[in-house]
Image (cartoon, rainbow, N blue to C red):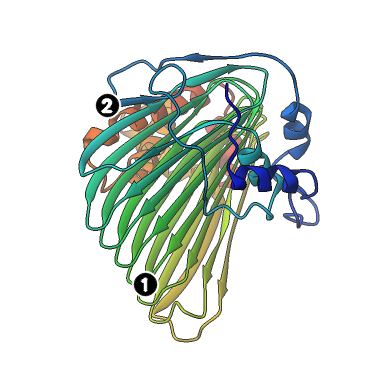
């Protein structure tokens, strides 16, 4: 493949040699919820990467198995100096695409990379002024590396966005998702994601004046997997609104973390922000972390709130569902399906069907694996 040569790529290569993976530890006890050692181990590994076309019907298939790369990336909202992950993502790009939808519904799938060599890919989507669109992006991976998806909803545009993150190999991988909203833009989005030996989902929404984002994430880890979902929001304009939530569940010896920071800058006067994260533990061996934070740099706001919860399925819920004839696994499945459907609420069905299918596969995998039966959960309910 031809190497990308833009000034941005050259700058990223220089920064990658000096910047750290993470500048500040996540907590005094758990230094990093993302296992950076695994990323370092695979970063310069030699080998080949092949590409498989995704199954199903798609309007566009992007990558070596479909449409050829068309973008020598020259700009990005990523702060390359903030993390080695961002710098290496741009520095090691194998290819990139740039799309400008004109309105309507788009079902987009990325080619699935397979192999042990690091592979980086970036997709930039510009939703131009006053355009209204629905968009599904399916992002499978079976190779270490990074997938970047950067969506810019420009002035007055309206976007319904569904992103499916589908790791298909036990390798370290990161999905870097950015949503940048222009003046009076409105975005309703959802992410449904599975896990691997280490999956980092690095999300950020950037809001300008009068813009509105409603975002929900649903992530799952099972059988020794680890998923770290970071959902950041930065409001830089007045009269902006952010409603953000994340839900994760872990079963067996797995780890899920759902966290992030909601920032209201001095210019975000008369704005509001709501940030909620939850995690469900399905077995005694499972681990989960929820850590929502807020930084408010102005006193002239409408509202700001955050909430976190880590819990087991309450015994009274299980008892009620079993009294209606459901088995315990069926009760667990119904409860988790309710969380999944809540994460897809408000999005049109033409872009959520595949996400629902993946979510149900993740739920069934967790239930068929290791979870603590009801009698062991009583003390923790």
Point 22% across, 57% down: residue: 130
Q: Earlier in the sequence, mark 2 or mark 1?
A: 2
Q: Which residue is mark 1?
A: 209
Residues packed near mark 1 inside 10 Å, few (<14), some (14 to 19) or many (20 plus)? many
Quadrant where the N terminus lies?
top right
Image spot of residue 263 (x, y percent): 53, 68
Indicate left or right for 101 with 264 as reference: left
Indicate left or right for 339 with 172 as reference: left
Please determine whether, in this image, residue 67 is positioned above or below residue 377: above
- In this rendered view, identify the residue nearer to me: 309 or 372: 309
- In this rendered view, identify the residue nearer to me: 85 or 36: 85
Please determine whether, in this image, residue 3 is positioned above or below residue 305: above
Image spot of residue 368 (x, y percent): 51, 20
Q: Residue furthest left?
A: 104
Image spot of residue 240 (x, y percent): 37, 71
Point 45% across, 28% down: residue: 69
Indicate left or right for 323 with 328 as reference: left
Q: Which residue is mark 2?
A: 59
């Amino acid at each position: 493949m031809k190497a990308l040569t833009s000034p941005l790529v050259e700058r990223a290569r220089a920064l990658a040699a000096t910047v750290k993976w993470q500048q500040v530890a996540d907590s005094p006890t758990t230094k990093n919820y993302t296992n950076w050692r695994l990323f370092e181990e695979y970063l310069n590994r030699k080998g080949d990467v092949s590409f498989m076309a995704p199954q199903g019907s798609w309007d566009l298939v992007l990558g070596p198995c479909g449409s050829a790369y068309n973008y020598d990336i020259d700009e990005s909202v990523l702060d390359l100096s903030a993390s080695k992950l961002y710098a290496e993502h741009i520095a090691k790009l194998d290819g990139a695409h740039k799309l400008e939808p004109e309105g309507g519904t788009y079902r987009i799938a990325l080619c699935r990379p397979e192999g042990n060599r690091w592979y980086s890919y970036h997709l930039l989507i510009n939703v131009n002024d006053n355009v209204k669109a629905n968009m599904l992006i399916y992002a499978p991976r079976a190779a270490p590396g990074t997938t970047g998806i950067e969506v810019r909803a420009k002035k007055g545009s309206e976007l319904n966005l569904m992103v499916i993150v589908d790791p298909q190999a036990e390798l370290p991988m990161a999905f870097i998702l950015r949503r940048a909203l222009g003046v009076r833009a409105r975005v309703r989005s959802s992410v449904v994601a599975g896990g691997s030996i280490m999956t980092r989902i690095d999300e950020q929404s950037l809001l300008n004046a009068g813009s509105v984002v409603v975002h929900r994430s649903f992530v799952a880890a099972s059988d020794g997997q680890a998923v770290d979902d970071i959902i950041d929001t930065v409001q830089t304009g007045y009269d902006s609104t952010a409603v953000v939530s994340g839900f994760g569940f872990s079963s067996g010896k797995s780890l899920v973390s759902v966290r992030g920071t909601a920032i209201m800058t001095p210019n975000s006067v008369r704005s509001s922000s709501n940030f909620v994260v939850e995690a469900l533990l399905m077995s005694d061996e499972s681990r989960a972390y929820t850590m929502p934070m807020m930084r408010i740099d102005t006193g002239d706001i409408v509202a700001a709130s955050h909430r976190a919860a880590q819990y087991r399925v309450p015994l009274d819920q299980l008892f009620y569902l079993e009294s209606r004839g459901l088995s315990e696994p069926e009760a667990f499945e119904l409860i988790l399906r309710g969380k999944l459907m809540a994460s897809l609420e408000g999005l049109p069905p033409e872009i959520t069907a595949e996400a629902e299918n993946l979510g149900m596969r993740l739920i069934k995998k967790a239930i068929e694996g290791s979870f603590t039966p009801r009698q062991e959960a009583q003390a923790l309910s």
